Amino acid sequence: MKQKKTRLRAISLNYDLFQHETLRPPAPATLYTKILQDAARPLPIVTPPVKLPGQSLPTIAELYRIFDELNWLYWSGKLPSVTIKYSKRMLSAGSYTPSSKLIKLGQKYHQLFPHELVDTLKHEMIHILHYYHDAKFKAEAERVGTSIKATYHPSLQRPPKFVYECPKCRREYPRHKRMRMHSCGSCSGRRFDIRYKLRLKK
Ligand SMILES: [Zn+2]
Ligand SMILES: [Zn+2]
């Protein structure tokens, strides 16, 4: 009899460890209570997958993860760690700078060709070992299955910095570099003619 009493005490003590809510017997679950419970629950905030330009590319953290994966897959993890960045200005696919151990990936380029990103990364990773596009580079590119040349797209051409104009026929000469002693090809022929010296329009 004494033994039974202590056991009861122990049980009531254990009950105190629980929170009150859990001790309350649950209401019989009917469809109606289920609906009430669901209604009381705050609605989850669903953010639609918005793809803004520049946001569809992998994050820098993801790029490092891809780098590690490729490094293990193709080079047994032997490539040294490098810095990886996107370049907003770069119009080409990518570059590798050995002095700063830096892989730059062209943001504009990969917004046009997002499916080429891994290919570009692989290409730049080969440059860690082989600076030039020489025979060794090509053999490595073949081994890891990457291309040597990037895809061409007209929007990736840098607009000309200077536009020159012929004072006579008004023909325009867009150029990336400054011209000093050049005359219009159609007016002066093959030799420089001061009368048709091109002038800077903008
Ligand atoms: Zn290259
Ligand atoms: Zn001319």
Image: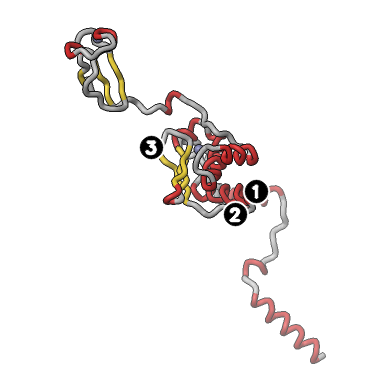
Q: CA distance from mark 3 to mark 2?
A: 31 Å
The quadrant of the rendering that contains the C terminus is top left
Q: Residue at x 73, y 80 (%)?
A: 11
What secondary structure is marked by label 1? helix
Q: Could you tell me how far apart the alpha carbons at marks 3 and 1 are, in whole angstroms?
A: 31 Å
Tell me the kind of residue under disc 2.
Answer: Lys
The amino acid type, in three-letter code, at marker 3 is Arg
* Residue 185, picture quadrant: top left
Pinpoint residue 164: horizontal percent, then vertical percent.
25, 19
Point out the frontmost of discs 3 and 2.
2
Position of 118 compared to 101: left or right? Answer: right
The x, y position of residue 99, in whole percent, is 42, 50
Which disc is residue 78 wearing? 2
Q: Tell me if mark 1 has few (under 14), some (14-19) or many (20+) residues whose alpha carbon lies within 10 angstroms of its own.
A: few
Reading the image, the residue beneath label 3 is 89
- Depicted 115 relative to depicted 59: above or below: above
- The one nearer the camera, 183 or 76, is 183
Mark 3 closeness class: few <14, some 14–19, many ≥20 residues within 10 Å: few
What whole-number distance in Å separates the C-alpha atoms at marks 1 and 2?
10 Å
User: Is 29 situated left or right of 1 in this image?
Assistant: left
Figure quadrant of residue 145: top right
Q: Which residue is mark 1?
A: 73
* Label 3 with label 2: CB-CB less than 8 Å: no
Mark whose residue sits in front, 3 or 1: 1
Between discs 3 and 1, the one toward the N terminus: 1
Per the image, label 3 sits on a secondary structure element best described as loop
Pointer 2: residues within 10 angstroms few (<14), some, or many (20+)?
A: few
In the image, farthest residue toward the left: 195
Q: Earlier in the sequence, mark 3 or mark 2?
A: 2
Above-or-below relation of 140 to 41: above
